Amino acid sequence: FLAARALRILPTYAVGFAVSALALWISVQVYGEAFPLSAKQLVIHAIAGARELFGAPMVDYVVWTLEVEIKFYIVCALAAAAIRGGRLSTFLVPAAIFVLVMALDRTTIAVNPVTDRIIDAWRFGGRFMIFMFIGTAVQFRHRGLLSRGATHALTAALFAAFLLQWYVGPLAEIFYQTSSWGIALVVFLLASIAPARYCRNAVFGFFAK
């Protein structure tokens, strides 16, 4: 599972970052400015997920979503037996993440720079992993492992936990952004309920694959 995810993500991301770095280099040439990244920072950025560990400045701000995704895959790999077996204990994982993030939001831990960055990365990413487990609940429903009511209840509970952590945590000042997450959730659920009604074509198929 992890090998498949790595082969899916790392090469594509490296190529994408190379394009971004090239665009940045061209722009500084045009405006006569110095290139803002060292060779070391370029190498760190070229490996998805490494930026957080080394504390490198963020170049492409949307990459944080990929960093969260990588951590989610690590969690899924650790819970693989429960997920594959369709056990409801799977959802103790987001519950544990919820408790951990709530505790970390209220605790200042200083060990060493590397450990502190790892803690901060999981503190930030954890709240989004709770949201991502909604997809796991829907997948259980499609496998016939959850009733419709149980799926609705789990979805509501996970989304409520996600909203609560956003509301009381360090992202509270931009809580209004959760409306877009709600819209995304509705679109996702509609697609999962009636996938046959969604348009199938070569363009959508290409990006889905």
Image: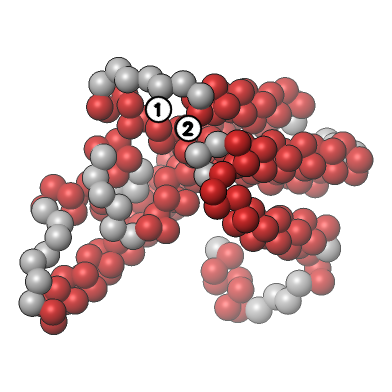
Q: What amino acid type should be assigned to the residue bearing mark 1?
A: Ile
Residue 151, x across and y down, in percent: 83, 41
Identify the element where label 1 is drawn.
Answer: helix
Total number of numbered discs in the rendering: 2
- Could you tell me which quadrant the C terminus lies in? bottom right
Question: Is residue 77 in sight in this rendering?
Answer: no
Q: In the rendered view, would you say 101 is above or below 147? A: above
- Structural distance between the alpha carbons of marks 1 and 2: 6 Å
- Can you name the residue that lies furthest to the front here? 173
Residue positioned 55% across, 52% down in the render: 174
Query: CB of mark 1 within 8 Å of CB of mark 2?
Result: yes
Residue 143, x across and y down, in percent: 79, 42
Q: Nearer the viewer, residue 144 or 134?
A: 134
Compared across the picture, whether 143 is left or right of 79 comes to: right
Residue positioned 26% across, 21% down in the render: 112
Identify the element where label 2 is drawn.
Answer: helix
Compared across the picture, whether 26 is left or right of 83 comes to: left
Q: In the rendered view, would you say 101 is above or below 110? A: below
Residue picked out by circle 2: 123
- Can you name the residue that lies furthest to the bottom here? 30
Residue positioned 24% across, 45% down in the render: 56
Q: Which mark is residue 119?
A: 1
Q: In the rendered view, would you say 112 is above or below 51? A: above
Q: Which mark is residue 90?
A: none
Q: What amino acid type should be assigned to the residue bearing mark 2?
A: Arg
Q: Residues within 10 Å of mark 2 (few under 14, many from 20)?
A: some
Q: Residues within 10 Å of mark 1 (few under 14, many from 20)?
A: some
Compared across the picture, whether 187 is left or right of 106 comes to: right
- Quarter of the image where one finds residue 118: top left
Residue positioned 22% across, 65% down in the render: 21
Question: Is residue 17 in sight in this rendering?
Answer: yes
